[in-house]
Amino acid sequence: MRKSVVAIVGRPNVGKSTIFNRLAGERISIVEDTPGVTRDRIYTEAEWLNQPFNIIDTGGIEIGDAPFLVEIREQAELAIQEADVIVFMVNGREGITGADEEVAKILFRSNKPVVLAVNKVDNPEMRDQIYEFYSLGFGEPFPISGTHGLGLGDLLDAVVGHFPERAEMVEDEETIHFSLIGRPNVGKSSLVNALLNQDRVIVSDVAGTTRDAVDSTFTREDQDFVIIDTAGMRKRGKVYETTEKYSILRALKAIERSDVVLVLINAEEGIIEQDKKIAGYAHDAGKAIVIVVNKWDTVESDEKKMKEFTDEIRAHFLYLDYAPIVFLSAKTKKRIHTLLPAILTASENHAKRIQTNVLNDVIMDALAMNPAPTYKGQRLKVLYATQVAVKPPAFAVFVNDPELMHFSYVRFLENRIREAFGFTGTPIKIFPRRRS
């Protein structure tokens, strides 16, 4: 389910980054008194009242000789466009300024819910000064202090109250949603077009052409698919266009909506560190994964070369040993017929459920083969196991003491489960639990 997005918007030096860091629970944005320090949109996850959401910290919308500084205005407007709720932040010590009124005009045109936060209200005596902010036209202003963390609860209550209702999915549960992620220019858009047999997505050799996630529906052999093309992810410090920086958030949102994630690698360039980081987003989200080596037509492809590349991928992506690897060329459609079966298998395994009695037979056989080791004079006793979730499959293993279950033994049980039931393409999770 897609998380709601909250954008913090305002003129420079009203404390947006301070509030952002408090909501994020860590120092992510640079905080200085110098206006314009935050030039790029920064995003993170937060949670309030058991509702997770994404927060965007934007550069201040600044008034200068020109109506707005172009780059900062573009960033803020992109954030406003993508947000479900906007926190409009002003400085309670300075009162309403002309810049605040200009920002308010932009927010009125957005037709998005706006919550007005009056920052730097550090003591109760200052609360009487906030009433002038009613004139901005956004209803009740919420006095807060980013420095001291005051008033954030009431502010977040108002923000969460504007989140859109989570409507039930109207699509058939049998429909497989899959997204394509990877650094720029690995051929994601070309692969979309090859699967759809039409030029649905603009294809260009210029890295970063695709900025938004685009959904396309198609059917193969009575199976419905929804394919989500995403903007390329580029390493921090290597991203020059403001719109491309923001595309990473949209790609992460596409991962959230996916059953299966295709991690694309460029066969011409080989594996780089950024590929591993990108794949980590999908793995951490618990999604089924297929590794796709694209542009296979550009290398001297034979069985020996394919095995060498496979070994290299396995060495670099140790945590993705469950993910199948597909070699293809989106441009020539060479081996493209191997992709959908891999997606289908990964999706089926991602939703697979194992009967408790069958699962425990496998667990007991594993214990007989490799008894649990002792730790500090105590021996781990595995009593029974049961599957507690799917997408990804998760198993609770009830033991005498969870602290005795070392990571290596968890890994051993995971391998035995995979040997018995497959689970190709999907991560599985094992949680040791004390029997009550």
Image: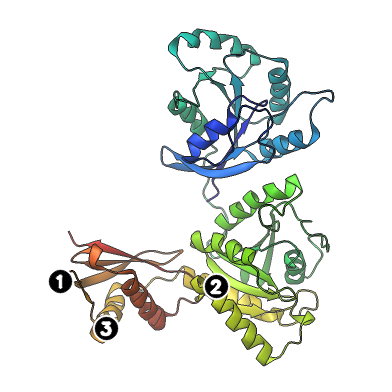
Residue that appears at 66% across and 53% down: 236
User: Mark 1 highlights which residue?
Assistant: 377
Residue 306 position, x and y percent, is 66, 86
Q: Residues within 10 Å of mark 3 (few under 14, many from 20)?
A: few
**SS label for mark 1:** loop
In the rendered image, the quadrant that contains the C terminus is bottom left
Check disc 3 and give the amino acid type: Asn
Residue 281 position, x and y percent, is 55, 59
Visual colour scheme: rainbow
Q: Residues within 10 Å of mark 2 (few under 14, many from 20)?
A: some
Which badge, 1 or 3, is on the more N-terminal residue?
3
Q: How many marks?
A: 3
User: Mark 2 highlights which residue?
Assistant: 317
User: Mark 3 highlights which residue?
Assistant: 370
**SS label for mark 3:** loop
Instruction: Give how far apart the Cα atoms at labels 3 and 2 are.
Output: 27 Å
Check disc 1 and give the amino acid type: Gly
The quarter holding residue 216 reads: bottom right
Residue that appears at 66% across and 57% down: 235
Cβ–Cβ under 8 Å for marks 1 and 2 = no
Residue that appears at 61% across and 21% down: 90
Residue 401 seen in this snapshot: yes
The quarter holding residue 12 reads: top right
